[in-house]
Amino acid sequence: MSRDITITARELSPFEQLVLGLVCEGKTNSAIARETNHTEKVVENTISRSAKTFGIISDQDTNIRVLLALAFRTHYGDAAFDRLGIPCSHMEINGQGQPICNREVH
């Protein structure tokens, strides 16, 4: 089943971007709460609100965190993966000598 996981309503706030970046690193809500000095409830609400922004709806067959991480990575880039030291398999050097990902996102 194909899903449309594009930003539908608005851009994410800086805090939402921070939380989703940590989700992409595999952090639990508890770990994110500790790292951002917020409660787990704030983190849960932020993840839920962000999922709605991407048009991701919860059902018994959907893992919201996985789809949210994929949507965030697609829309905001691979910074979370860069922090984990995972090399991009699509990396090449541009005309200015900077590494860029040449992956086309559909």
Image (cartoon, helix red, strand yellow):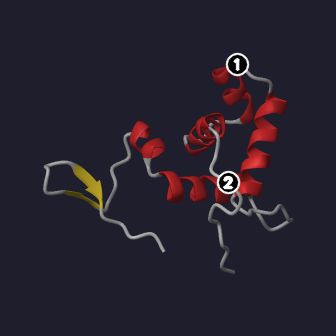
Q: Amino acid at mark 2?
A: Arg
Image height of 38 relative to 57, above or below:
above
In front of the other: 63 or 101: 101
Image height of 81 relative to 66, above or below:
above
Q: Amino acid at mark 1?
A: Asn
Judge left or right: residue 81 versus residue 43.
Answer: left
Residue 4: x %, y % from top left = 66, 72
Q: Which mark is residue 75?
A: none
Q: Earlier in the sequence, mark 1 or mark 2?
A: 2
* Callout 2: SS: loop
Residue 67 in which image quadrant: bottom right
Residue where numbered disc 1 is placed: 37
Residue 62: x %, y % from top left = 77, 64
In space, the residues marked 1 and 2 are separated at their CA atoms by 25 Å
Residue at 13%, 49% (x, y): give it.
97
Judge left or right: residue 54 versus residue 78.
Answer: right
Image height of 6 relative to 31, above or below:
below
* Callout 1: SS: loop
In front of the other: 14 or 18: 14
Residue where numbered disc 2 is placed: 10
Residue at 23%, 50% (x, y): give it.
99
Residue 5: x %, y % from top left = 65, 66
Residue 43: x %, y % from top left = 76, 34
Q: Nearer the viewer, mark 1 or mark 2?
A: 2
Residue 32 in which image quadrant: top right
Residue at 44%, 50% (x, y): give it.
78
> Label 1: how many residues lie within 10 Å, few (<14), some (14-19) or many (20+)?
few
Residue at 56%, 40% (x, y): give it.
21
